[in-house]
């Protein structure tokens, strides 16, 4: 049972499925309101074929405001997931894997308890990092889920330290995600740049992420506004965020050529990674962002904030450069420093690519390790 509304979850399941594991995939989805920004949920199908496995989207009640009623959403998700799985799948499951403790982990809890099935949850930060922001009932539900879990997985060592606030150290394991370098046509870099209309002397800066405060888009705009050079172009790829229209408006006012893309196809995103001279990620907080693995696979160096699990990924000065979060001046200075040395950018990009391989930060290795963990908890 999995939540597949984000790309890294989908890729994780694809990789797991490629190991020969049979998957029943369940992605709890809110009932759609008739109007407003969440009304598009009405277009989510009841089921959907993803490669060789099918995804099921049972509906549950999502109550607003979240601050006061998130626990009601959790209870609804648990009730509906339990009944849906019981009537839909005949074969008993050996293990349940969820993407996070809340909502998905808690939604699976009753089903696991009734059948004594081990539960493994992989957190990407949200539920653990935001724990203190939740109301007491949600906090209790998260603790209840973690207590039942046979294994608590996190994507970074920094997040694993947070998880140990809630679970015994013996339960907690860092399981990095990653990227597969063979999907990135690095041998076609110059041809791709020509296709995109990028001149050889132009330095292409790439931002990929949600257009929101926490991703550092305000600092990015301020740094770009102060960047006094005529050899820079910007490509920004977004997939959500409250500052979408503000960010696009600000990019349009820059003297540098800029292109913004919305919910771009993964193949197109990979081409932009290959074409870019530098990935810029000035986030305020992160776990281990997928976009950095993607840049490493594309041999593109990274300029990012020194937060969360990012220092575990980037070797400062060797595979990229780290700067303080929320500091537009230092971000601009780092940009100037890096853009003045094209050869240094290439060397850093190659070093980052090699680090990805050396650390085995690939989806194949991720799936192999995840399968090992599943076998361990099944046979406990």
Image: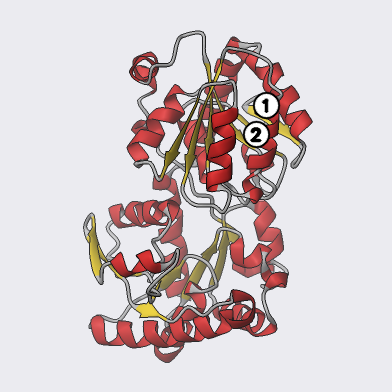
Residue at 57%, 79% in the rendered image: 70
- Decide if residue 171 is on the left or right side of residue 36: right
Tag of residue 252: none
Q: Which residue is mark 1?
A: 225
Q: Is residue 5 above or below residue 231?
A: below
Residue at 41%, 66% in the rendered image: 3
What's the coloring here?
Answer: secondary structure
Examine the rendering and report whether any part of residue 144 can be seen: no
Q: Which residue is mark 2?
A: 221
Query: Are the residues at dot 1 and dot 2 in contact (C-beta closer than 8 Å)?
Result: yes
Q: In front: 338, or 259?
A: 259
Q: In front: 150, or 12?
A: 12
Q: Is residue 229 above or below residue 333?
A: above
How far apart marks 1 and 2 lie (CA) works out to 6 Å
Q: Residue furthest bottom?
A: 114
Examine the rendering and report whether any part of residue 156 can be seen: yes
- Decide if residue 57 is on the left or right side of residue 98: left
Mark 2, Cα crowd under 10 Å, few <14 / some 14-19 / many 20+, is: some
Q: Position of residue 120 (x, y in %)?
A: 49, 70
Q: Position of residue 10 (x, y in %)?
A: 37, 55
Q: Is residue 274 above or below residue 260?
A: above
Location of residue 41 (image quadrant): bottom left
Q: Is residue 297 above or below residue 188?
A: below
Q: Position of residue 35 (x, y in %)?
A: 40, 70
Residue at 54%, 54% in the rendered image: 175
**Label total for image:** 2
Residue at 42%, 88% in the rendered image: 79
């Amino acid at each position: 049972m999995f939540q597949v509304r984000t790309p890294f979850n989908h890729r994780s399941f694809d990789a797991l499925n490629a190991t020969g594991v049979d998957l029943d995939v369940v992605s709890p989805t809110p009932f759609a309101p008739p109007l407003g920004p969440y009304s598009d949920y009405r277009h989510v199908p009841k089921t959907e074929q993803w490669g060789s496995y099918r995804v099921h989207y049972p509906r549950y009640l999502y109550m607003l405001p979240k601050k006061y009623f998130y626990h009601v959403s959790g209870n609804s998700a648990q009730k509906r997931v339990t009944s849906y799985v019981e009537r839909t799948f005949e074969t008993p499951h050996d293990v349940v894997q969820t993407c996070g403790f809340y909502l998905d982990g808690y939604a699976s809890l009753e089903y696991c308890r009734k059948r004594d099935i081990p539960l493994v949850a992989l957190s990407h930060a949200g539920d653990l990092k935001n724990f203190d922001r939740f109301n007491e009932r949600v906090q209790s539900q998260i603790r209840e889920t973690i207590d039942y879990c046979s294994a608590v997985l996190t994507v970074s060592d920094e997040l694993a330290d947070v998880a140990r606030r809630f679970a015994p150290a013996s339960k907690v394991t860092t399981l990095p995600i990653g990227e597969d370098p063979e999907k990135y046509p690095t041998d076609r870099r110059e041809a791709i740049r020509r296709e995109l209309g990028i001149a050889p002397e132009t330095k292409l800066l790439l931002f990929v992420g949600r257009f929101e405060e926490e991703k550092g888009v305000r600092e990015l705009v301020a740094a770009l506004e102060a960047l006094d050079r005529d050899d820079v172009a910007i490509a920004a790829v977004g997939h959500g965020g409250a500052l979408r229209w503000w960010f696009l408006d600000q990019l349009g006012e820059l003297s540098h050529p800029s292109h913004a893309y919305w919910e771009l196809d993964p193949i197109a995103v990979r081409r932009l990674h290959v074409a870019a001279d530098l990935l810029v990620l000035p986030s305020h907080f992160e776990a281990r962002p997928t976009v950095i693995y993607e840049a490493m696979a594309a041999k593109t160096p990274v300029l990012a904030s020194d937060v969360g699990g990012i220092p575990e990924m980037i070797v400062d000065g060797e595979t990229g450069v780290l700067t303080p979060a929320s500091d537009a001046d230092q971000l601009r200075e780092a940009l100037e420093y890096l853009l003045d040395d094209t050869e240094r950018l290439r060397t850093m990009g190659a070093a980052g690519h090699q680090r990805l391989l050396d650390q085995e930060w690939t989806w194949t290795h991720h799936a192999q390790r995840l399968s090992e963990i599943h076998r361990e908890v099944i046979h406990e």
